[in-house]
Image: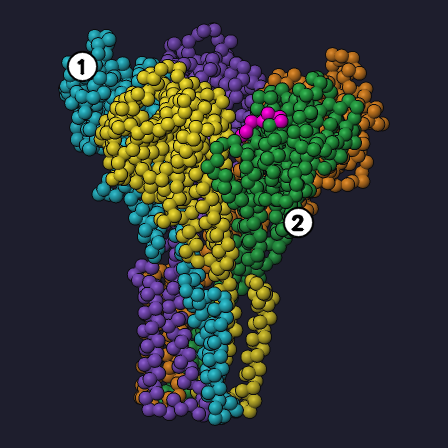
Chain colours: A orange, B purple, C cyan, D yellow, E green
Amino acid sequence: MGAAMFDALHRRVRKRGQPPGTVTYVGPSRTSSVALEAIIAGPDGVHSETPASPEACAVYDSPARAPGAPGFVWLNMDGLHDPDCVTRLGHVFHLHPLVLEDIVHTGQRPKLDDLDDALFVVLKMLRYDEERRTIVDEQVSFVLRRGLLLTFQEKAHGDVFGEVRKRLLASSGKLCKSGPDYLMYALIDAVVDNYFVVLERMGEDIEEMEEKLLRAPTPEELETIHALKREALFLRKFVWPLREVLARLEKGGYDLVDEATIVYLRDLYDHTIQVMDTIETFRDMLSGMLDLYLSNVSLKLNETMKVLTIISTIFIPLSFLASLYGMNFKHMPELETEYGYYVVLGVMACTVAGMLYYFRRKGWLGGAS
Amino acid sequence: MGAAMFDALHRRVRKRGQPPGTVTYVGPSRTSSVALEAIIAGPDGVHSETPASPEACAVYDSPARAPGAPGFVWLNMDGLHDPDCVTRLGHVFHLHPLVLEDIVHTGQRPKLDDLDDALFVVLKMLRYDEERRTIVDEQVSFVLRRGLLLTFQEKAHGDVFGEVRKRLLASSGKLCKSGPDYLMYALIDAVVDNYFVVLERMGEDIEEMEEKLLRAPTPEELETIHALKREALFLRKFVWPLREVLARLEKGGYDLVDEATIVYLRDLYDHTIQVMDTIETFRDMLSGMLDLYLSNVSLKLNETMKVLTIISTIFIPLSFLASLYGMNFKHMPELETEYGYYVVLGVMACTVAGMLYYFRRKGWLGGAS
Amino acid sequence: MGAAMFDALHRRVRKRGQPPGTVTYVGPSRTSSVALEAIIAGPDGVHSETPASPEACAVYDSPARAPGAPGFVWLNMDGLHDPDCVTRLGHVFHLHPLVLEDIVHTGQRPKLDDLDDALFVVLKMLRYDEERRTIVDEQVSFVLRRGLLLTFQEKAHGDVFGEVRKRLLASSGKLCKSGPDYLMYALIDAVVDNYFVVLERMGEDIEEMEEKLLRAPTPEELETIHALKREALFLRKFVWPLREVLARLEKGGYDLVDEATIVYLRDLYDHTIQVMDTIETFRDMLSGMLDLYLSNVSLKLNETMKVLTIISTIFIPLSFLASLYGMNFKHMPELETEYGYYVVLGVMACTVAGMLYYFRRKGWLGGAS
Amino acid sequence: MGAAMFDALHRRVRKRGQPPGTVTYVGPSRTSSVALEAIIAGPDGVHSETPASPEACAVYDSPARAPGAPGFVWLNMDGLHDPDCVTRLGHVFHLHPLVLEDIVHTGQRPKLDDLDDALFVVLKMLRYDEERRTIVDEQVSFVLRRGLLLTFQEKAHGDVFGEVRKRLLASSGKLCKSGPDYLMYALIDAVVDNYFVVLERMGEDIEEMEEKLLRAPTPEELETIHALKREALFLRKFVWPLREVLARLEKGGYDLVDEATIVYLRDLYDHTIQVMDTIETFRDMLSGMLDLYLSNVSLKLNETMKVLTIISTIFIPLSFLASLYGMNFKHMPELETEYGYYVVLGVMACTVAGMLYYFRRKGWLGGAS
Amino acid sequence: MGAAMFDALHRRVRKRGQPPGTVTYVGPSRTSSVALEAIIAGPDGVHSETPASPEACAVYDSPARAPGAPGFVWLNMDGLHDPDCVTRLGHVFHLHPLVLEDIVHTGQRPKLDDLDDALFVVLKMLRYDEERRTIVDEQVSFVLRRGLLLTFQEKAHGDVFGEVRKRLLASSGKLCKSGPDYLMYALIDAVVDNYFVVLERMGEDIEEMEEKLLRAPTPEELETIHALKREALFLRKFVWPLREVLARLEKGGYDLVDEATIVYLRDLYDHTIQVMDTIETFRDMLSGMLDLYLSNVSLKLNETMKVLTIISTIFIPLSFLASLYGMNFKHMPELETEYGYYVVLGVMACTVAGMLYYFRRKGWLGGAS
């Protein structure tokens, strides 16, 4: 996740010096080919097509179709490593060069741009990679136009749109009866729903962590808390601007977004706030756990020191006494006395008793502390 | 309480992949049956009815009753684990699918939605569970319409509305003379009043904690402070959005809320601010206590180390001296002298005196420190 | 002070379950009787009266007096433990039940309510109780109407209004020439002036603390800093809403507040900001002091450990050497040599010299550190 | 600087109980006499006069002079310990009693008051007192009227206005051609420029501090950082409200401030923001330094403990072995063997080697750590 | 970087006492000569000229050229140490003295001033100086007028504008077809792109740091983290106001900025937010790393103490026993027994076993901790 950020910086720097609006793919290089898929929802049902080339998509543009015709087209492009393909598609749909640049440049911050005849939304899909035990982000861009929704996904596999596509192709429910704005809502909703999966996964880690913490703290836990804190930090970085995007969408005032969809967007906005709330709560909990951890270390140090102090303080004087009478002076009258040894043993016993009394009074010998 | 949050995440994830507006109960499964109760306040008094089925509630809808008729109906539903029942009720009163989803999905954030002909309010009731010594939350939803108030409670037992129901059924006071908006105020007021009970319980824990802290700190206290901090964190999470809800209600501008009720809502809003204030104060106090606790540990460590240092520093040199004259060298002239032993004892006494003087000057032997 | 907050919670809980607007005194029970005093400022001078009962106050209501008549009445009530008296007074002046509830319920947050024909202001008077060495708060409520100012004080002794009353009765200065709005300003000004006394007292404690801190830190100081931090916390809780009240008053727009009084209110507002500033500065200073204190403890621990380490590190190897030649092996050639003892003494001296050199290089033997 | 704040509190308390608008000087008592100086800029040049008494200043009031006459008067009063003089001057120029009170009461927060026919600005001049090595603040008040600028300085010596006076009397540049608003700008500019001197002095202390910190940390440094933090705290307290004052002036809308002066005020506002920025940066740097310092102490403690642990852990077992064979039991077969001594020496060598290996593996013997 | 700030303070102080608008170069003195370069973009192509003197630039002023003529002029000045030259240039283009002062005074905060017929933008170019391993800042000022863009660079070498100049002179692309507003956008874009280079460099340091941190922490790392935190602090100081500048530019409403350029400025604004985001993330990461580092130190201290405690606690009692029987009393019956030695050895073994059991139960002998 942190790597993702550093990647984003590298990419941006790699394309420096080019005039603005240059469409260069700066994400990691990939081998899978770009895939285009068009789903056409018309009065006579929903069907899927695979355009041969970006140019072949021109027929999906509304002006090319009968104006006012019911239904809409969803054109999805998987994989962004072929900037040429994106450029050609952009040419077909007259997209601004900066928009194309934003689509291809995968280090974007979630945002909403109001182009004159289109809405452009960039956001981040999050997925928990079980193998690498880390959160991976993938950029998704939406271009919403009259009767047309273009979507661009960064990665070519494992998308989160499958469920929505299935529902749409089933020609059932609100999806195929509403316009592309509702479809965009449904897709963003799928993305945000996935955030909850990531959060749940993270919440499990935190819960597990917390139980461990009440037992003996180890350095590994410290690093895990640290790693979780960083994940929360990066999640927040992605969700915060998304919240703004949805707040603006939900306030309405865009011709392309139907009044009826606004209600759903408001609901979606509430979900994003819940995501934010959960992240903030995670952050607070992790901070609290870190404090608890460090306090525990501090307490244990104190306890360790008490053990050392008690043992040392009891035996060091005794050892001195023993050493004293181990001296080899010729004239040491005590050594000659018959009960000297027993007197010394008695003195030692008294010293121990005195020390123990002192420690007890200080509360150092009490049960837990 | 923390568990509650994790639960909310699990629930949300469990219902992922369903189209928005699907009414699935995602709370813990329950066995008690759903209970419907209608209280009808009319010009001829207040009485209570138990509708046989959700459909039977259609008669309570204002269009079904004579328009402009005085009085109102309060329809309360206890237990949300039967989503079918909620859906049927929603159908009867033409509620938006998203509203029904929010009612049933018990992980909602408190909020106010202005539907065209209704106000939808979600909030959290808090109860201190004495047995488990933890705060439990329960979702309560309100749908306020002309002449009708629908309330949905998550749990089927121990509700906080009992007092208000009793007052209403007694047909006395402002409650039965005002509209359903005042009833909603009275119910929310009962919920917020309960927050103070929870806060008082928490305040007692904090007070008790504070007294303990002035005595010897133990690891248990650390965990208690930590637990209290987390509780304050979660309380804040519920009360903060409630404050916003009431702020919006109090600003007025809703047809369904009477001008006369606004004064009461403002008072209620003041109470919520007081709740927030108290929570913030608790948080500040707990932080202060944690600081004090850790400082105490740190101070005690220093004290422990002083004891060890004083004892070690005094006896280690003495022991060395003793060991020195315990050596078995053939030629050690001091050993042969008549007063060697006494000289060594004298040197030792001087060393002790010197050390004690040094420690006194350093202030290590002073009373408390 | 902390106790005050917990008290407020207890009180609020104690009155739970009553319908809103019920006037129950929830403060500590008192024995002194309620006192009513009316000061009438008319064109012919200022005089004081003692109404026999709340009902007898009806004559002070402006409609009862000639309309447009110059002068005004200040009706002050000392002690709130007789809610019945407050209710009767409220009845005489047609006050809203919620207002009466707020007057009597002494756990209010400072606030300003704009009733239709009156302004209702609640604030907290602060007094430093020298005996208990703590800050006590007392609730004061103002009801400002055309030609009439009602004031309610929680406690029956030691009020802060004495000075203003004297100035008013002296019939001199701006006080008796202006209306009740200026009188209210003068009274709030007296309350805020008292805040400075409390702050000065606290500032003295902080100053004294700071001097102590530069000398040896003791655990008592830690607790004092902690206690001062909590006092600052509670002061802030009272002054922050007062600032809002004055900001709203100063912005004008209230018929009952004369344009000429606004200038004075602005001045008062500036004073409240100064109070806030001072409290924030105190908080920052106390935090800084706590940091300094803990750093000092940490430094002293390090110093303690250095002493221990230096002594141990020097003598432990020497003791070992001495013990070595204290062994009783039959065949230990060194013991037989004539100068063995002196060689060992020499080796010991070298060890000490080496250790001292090492510590000096490490900077452990330098003056201060 | 801290003292300054406590002083302000004492002063405010000392004047409690007086009616608002009472002009009592509450600053430290001074012996130097009050000085009035008038500088008259007319079409025929600039000259300076010394009015005999406050009443003699009446001729400088614009109504007294020909209306619309070019030029302006700057009347400066040094020293505020003679409140009577201020009151008389206020009487001559019809100033509001609260304004006079604010001028004389030297514990004011910087502020801007828009009187009907005048602008009243209070701000703080800061000076670094090299002798006492502390920052001293002095209150400066401005009353800007049509054709007249009144300035009041708290202290009678070492003012910051000298440079501007010289430039004005030289009758050259923009100063004497513009109105009194530009003169006020020039004077405030001189005050703010002085802030940079104070900041530079503080910056030098911080720079010096930082170099010291990279060497061995001493307790003195801790106190210096603490003192610098407090200075930054107080600077911030003075500059923050000044920023607001200038923001309001710069936004224009005051008849008395010429459009042409606004450009300069905006520049001045930028400077204040720079002052704020620098203070915030200082605060952040000082916090960082404190962290670094404490981390260093913590690291050094760890290092100290390592030295102690290494020495103790190596020699304590050896000493035990030596003591073991120093026992005087009759039957200790090892003592009789011929090579027992050498075997024990060998065992000791092995123990040391083992310990050293263990510590090396733990990384405790590595160079720096 | 820190030095840069202290420099800025020194410079500002050095010019104190001069009337506002005095053009004094206060940056470090330089020897390279000032360089003027004009690039003229006309309908007939783009060419570059080198004006002989500032006065010779008058021909580039739009009024001097045919009004409404297509094309524009970019006049760039390298090196600001010749204030006279700047003044003369300012005279030619009628720039306000304060603008000239701001151009020359290199300690400015990034800002945007709307002069009547021109836009004045100041910002900071950042460069990572590989040699000194520090970030250097350079002030760049823009004056945008109808058909003319003036740029002022502080340093005479290594500018960031080279790429744009090349693209412009190549007469290709949007650059030469658009107006000077687009050119200004392209130049600011180049500056902001450079921020990403600096951030990437810093990100690499942080990444490298993080890897080191998981291994043994050394004091050097502490200082590096501290230094990186300070760099982030200073970066933030420069980027924050730049964000405001671009926000104002992007909101439009300036005649001099074309509608078509606004889209690009919005994109640029997004980049600045990304820079801010990255800096904030760096700060959070560095804080997290510092916490981790200190926690590690604390953990290691605890571990060190455990080793010491285990060794001491085991051997100190043994040593005492050995010393005990090393005493030279005449009458010590144990010494005479045949198996006394073995009994003592047995007691010692038991003691060791007991201690080890105790430590194991305490979890001190477990693998990692």
In the image, residue E96 lies in the stretch drawn in magenta: yes
Rendering coords of residue B268 (x, y %): 39, 24
Q: Callout 1: 10 Å neighbours few (<14), some, many (20+)? A: some
Q: Amino acid at mark 1?
A: Gly
The answer to whether any part of residue B124 appears in the image is no
Vertical placement of residue D20 versus B297, above or below = above
C64 or A176: which is nearer to us?
C64
Q: Is residue B358 magenta?
A: no
Q: Which residues are magenta?
A: E92-98
Query: Which numbered tag is attached to residue C42?
Result: 1
x, y percentage for residue A270? 56, 27
Question: Circle 2 sits in a helix, a strand or a loop, which is it?
Answer: loop
Which residue: 45% across, 46% down? D201
- Distance Cα–Cα, label 1 vs label 2: 83 Å
Query: Which residue of the protein is positioned furthest toward the right in this rendering?
Result: A52
Subunit of mark 1? Answer: C
Q: Residue at x 66, y 22 (%)?
A: E146
Q: Nearer the viewer, residue E44 or C13?
A: E44
- Quarter holding the C terminus of chain C is bottom left
Residue shown at 40% from the left, 15% from the top? D68
Asked if the residues shown at circle 1 and circle 2 are in contact, with their CB atoms under 8 angstroms apart, the answer is no
**Local crowd size for mark 2, using a 10 Å CA cut-off: few (<14), some (14–19), many (≥20):** few
Q: Is residue E235 left or right of residue B218?
A: right
